Image (cartoon, rainbow, N blue to C red):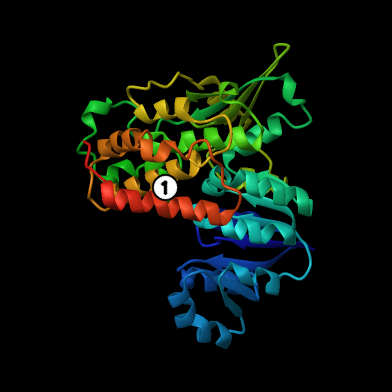
Amino acid sequence: MIDIAILGSTGSIGTNTLKSISSERNFKIKLLSTNKNIKKLYQQAKKFNVKDVIINDKKIYLKNKKFFKKKKINSYYGFKNINKIIKKKLNYSINSISGIDGLEPTLELIPHTKNILIANKESIICGWNIISKKLKYYKTNFIPIDSEHYSISELIKNEPLNTIDKIILTASGGPFLNKSFETLSNIKPKNALKHPKWKMGKKISIDSSTMMNKIFEFIEAKKIFNLKNKDISIVIHPDSFIHAVVFFKGGLIKLLAHETNMQIPISNALGIKKTKIKNIKKYIINLNNSKFDLPNNKKFPLLNLIKLIPDRTSYFETILTTLNDNLVDKYLNGHINYKSIHKNLLILIKKPFFKKYYKLKPMNIYDINNIIMITKKYLDQNFKYYE
């Protein structure tokens, strides 16, 4: 049997993971988790006969503790209990918890799994230096399952780093690809959430529309694959069929393509490769119709942030993530307009108050949580509305 734990099982990635293994009899799910979606967590535990679940919201946990006990399912509050649940190294663990809240469970999981699959951008962006040390210490294999980074890992597998000339991340351009930035002031959240290709959560959908999600992926690729800023570029590919392109020294170019379905990278990462491509003609048409374009910084102003990314790990990534999270939340709650996300972020990230942290780096999760608290406090005291 292949033992697996899925953290964030009620979210998009977790749900797709369960779909991927639903017909695989050799997978045994040892642990599921959620923050608040108790109904879905119970349905999952019942369907897959899972005996242990973690609920990461204390009030929700206390409210439902008796319910799970009655159903003969062990429920726990918080990820510190992972070591009570998992007694021997699992074959696979997946962390699909969104936001910086995913960092702690990543660190808790690593000692208990042979392979860890991560779709949590913020963990990698803010804490990769901490994660990578722990991976090495516990000899745990890391597999990215975001479609872009999984594609890159497959394309450069067994290739020496010094043979890579350029890595290309593809971006759909989001719902406003054909609109000018000047016309976006009054865009309502319901329109910004309409991604043309992917079905995602609210936060990541807004990030995709502003191109912030691609900047995060840029930083992820840099950290995961030990690259410099100059080694990575972004191109617009509206069809989202080709997920990464790698140029090699010597003239070779490799690309990886698949449908906009997260089950594909997840299944392949888990070694499930039974599904055959039924309609070859459809894929040939998709390849023939593949179009690429260079992104326009006037249309996507946040791409100017790439020039500010330090080559070395620092607090820059955590501050950037925290500022963006805060601004997206303000937009979704009607406190600022759409263009203001961009203008505020570009102004705030250059503030002297934050710049002093860009030459320092976090050494542990407490350092990261501390700079998040400092950034939020600064915003609470100094936020100004820039339209």
Q: Nearer the viewer, residue 67 or 101?
A: 101
Dot 1: within a 10 Å radius of its alpha carbon, few (fewer than 14), some, or many (20 or more) residues? many
Above or below: residue 27 compared with residue 383: below
Q: Position of residue 28 (x, y in %)?
A: 72, 66
Q: Amino acid at mark 1?
A: Thr
| Residue 110 as seen in the image, left or right of residue 180 | right
- Residue at 45% over, 18% down: 294
Secondary structure of residue under mark 1: helix
Q: Nearer the viewer, residue 342 or 299?
A: 342
| Residue 279 as seen in the image, left or right of residue 159 | left
Name the residue carrying label 1. 322
Q: Nearer the viewer, residue 264 or 33?
A: 33
Above or below: residue 297 compared with residue 94: above
Q: Position of residue 247 (x, y in %)?
A: 65, 18
Can residue 165 be seen by looking at this rendering?
yes
Q: Nearer the viewer, residue 371 or 242?
A: 371
Q: Position of residue 165 (x, y in %)?
A: 66, 18
| Residue 253 as seen in the image, left or right of residue 56 | right
Based on the displayed image, in which of its 4 quarters is residue 148 positioned? top right
State the quadrant of the N terminus: bottom right
Can residue 98 be seen by looking at this rendering?
no
Above or below: residue 304 compared with residue 104: above
Q: Position of residue 122 (x, y in %)?
A: 52, 47
- Residue at 51% over, 62% down: 10
State the quadrant of the C terminus: top left
